[in-house]
Amino acid sequence: MAKGLSVSKKMKLLPLIAATYFMVSGGPYGLEDIIGKAGYGRALLLLLLVPLFWSLPTSLMVGELASALPEEGGYYRWVRLALGEFWGFQEAWLSLAASIFDMAIYPVIFVLYLGRIEPAWTAGARGTLWALVVVVVCAAWNLRGAKAVGEGSVGLFCLLLSPFVVLTAVGFWKGFTAHSGVGLFSAAPAAGADLAGAISVTLWNYMGWDNASTVAQEVVEPQRNYPRAMLASAGLVALTYILPLAAVGLAGIPADRFSTGAWTDAAREVVGPWLAVCVVLGGTINGFGMFNALMMSYTRVPYALAEEGLLPKALTWKTTVGVPWVSVVLCSAAWALALNLTFERLISIDLVLYGAALVLEFVALVVLRVKEPALARPFRVPGGLWAAIAVGVGPTLLIGFALWAAKGERVAGLPALAFAAIVAAAGPVVYLAAQGMRRGKAV
């Protein structure tokens, strides 16, 4: 059991912050489409405003529930206690279903940046093979334990952001000396601007705050460290998004030249070819680091379900460092099957499924305030019951917008919303099957 792990095998605060950073962000990579779709001025406003209505409320909710219920399985346990086993299972189902599409994005990012070093390396089937390598290597890393993943995330964080420190410094210097800061706000949006698409990509770049909660029993002093990690990582994510974006805008890089992977060209133009190579290498770290940290998070959910007999008992088998290794292997295989979906389609499906799960978590926050008033809460969302209700309004409205924005996307011949609805509707069916399996074993 994870709760039996010695302190020496658990994550401390700094590794938890780094792991949370990778679960949510992984650096400025992924912002390119926001700039291309909205232009610099609007992109900067989105990156400033979305955290206030999305990241901050979510991190406050996670801080309260993770500190009050620091259990393996995280958000699944919260919803189960608040709303019962059925809704707890739906929370787990929606999160795991979202992970199928979410996790396929990061090996794709790895391949995109690797191809900028040498296109022949990722041509044709080679790109898929490289993506599979990411899956296998991260699975092996995860088997070393949460502490290894967290500490590795600290090193990857430093490596990933070091090129952007240089790019940001030189971009601001060039902007203020050569462009006087005019280009950032006066430039018109690119032709064919897509503000709705930009908002969706912004939401995707700021989501995932609850993912760190699933490894609570593998964290030192979770009641104390989770709220601190949430707030610290929220600040880091916003800072490492806004500063590089403002710097390249001030340096005069046209917004319409930005699409996935374009940080490389910006680094080459603003600083030189050597920094472009560093940014490319950082892009591969981004894809790898996010996949690695999120694998640690998602694989604890099947473990928690199996503990209660809702999935096969084999999923509870653990290594000596507390890793549910069967869950790691099976989840890795499932994620590998989604590697060939396109980036835009992945975001649309991911937002729909993740959004539904997130709404359940905000409902759990409110219900537990009423149902379990005596529950020890080392950290609380400031205010009483109405504050707990109000904190979920912004994220819920933004999720509704994401649903509307995804109306034009299609997956497997179906509208993305219909596809996601079918996946979500399968949850109750799978729950009934899981109950039947549990009853059969009890006979």
Image (cartoon, rainbow, N blue to C red):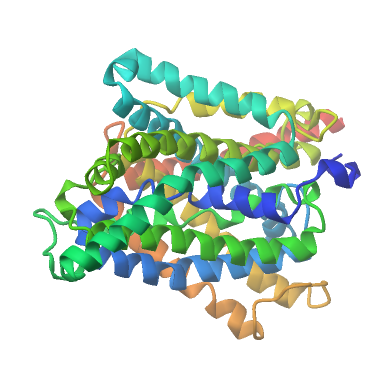
Give the camera-side residue of 347 and 315.
Answer: 347
Which of the pair 148/266 is nearer the observer?
Answer: 266
Q: Locate residue 13: give its quadrant.
A: bottom right
Whole-percent x and y of residue 184?
20, 66
- Residue ID at (67%, 58%): 79
- Identify whether 393 is placed above or below 346: below
Left-right relation of 70 to 417? right
Where is residue 63 shown, x and y percent of the image? 67, 66
What is the number of callouts on the image? 0
Does residue 180 lie above or below 437 as drawn? below
Specify the farthest residue to the front.
Answer: 177
- Residue for point 42% across, 31% down: 110
> Vertically, is 384 above or below 17?
below
x and y percent of residue 380 in the render? Answer: 70, 76
Residue 363 appears in the figure: no
The reply, left or right, for residue 41 in relation to residue 345 is left
Instruction: Assign the N terminus to one quadrant of the image.
Output: top right
Please indicate whether residue 253 sits to the left or right of residue 263 in the image: left
Does residue 256 appear anywhere in the picture?
yes
Quarter-of-image position of residue 367: bottom right
User: Residue, x 41% and y 38% (percent of image)?
Assistant: 283
Query: Residue 141: image x %, image y %?
Result: 66, 28
Residue drawn at the location 19% of the way across and 53% of the way down: 253
Along the line of sight, the residue nearer the viewer: 14 or 25: 14
Which quadrant would the C terminus be assigned to in this image? top right
Q: Quadrant of residue 185?
A: bottom left
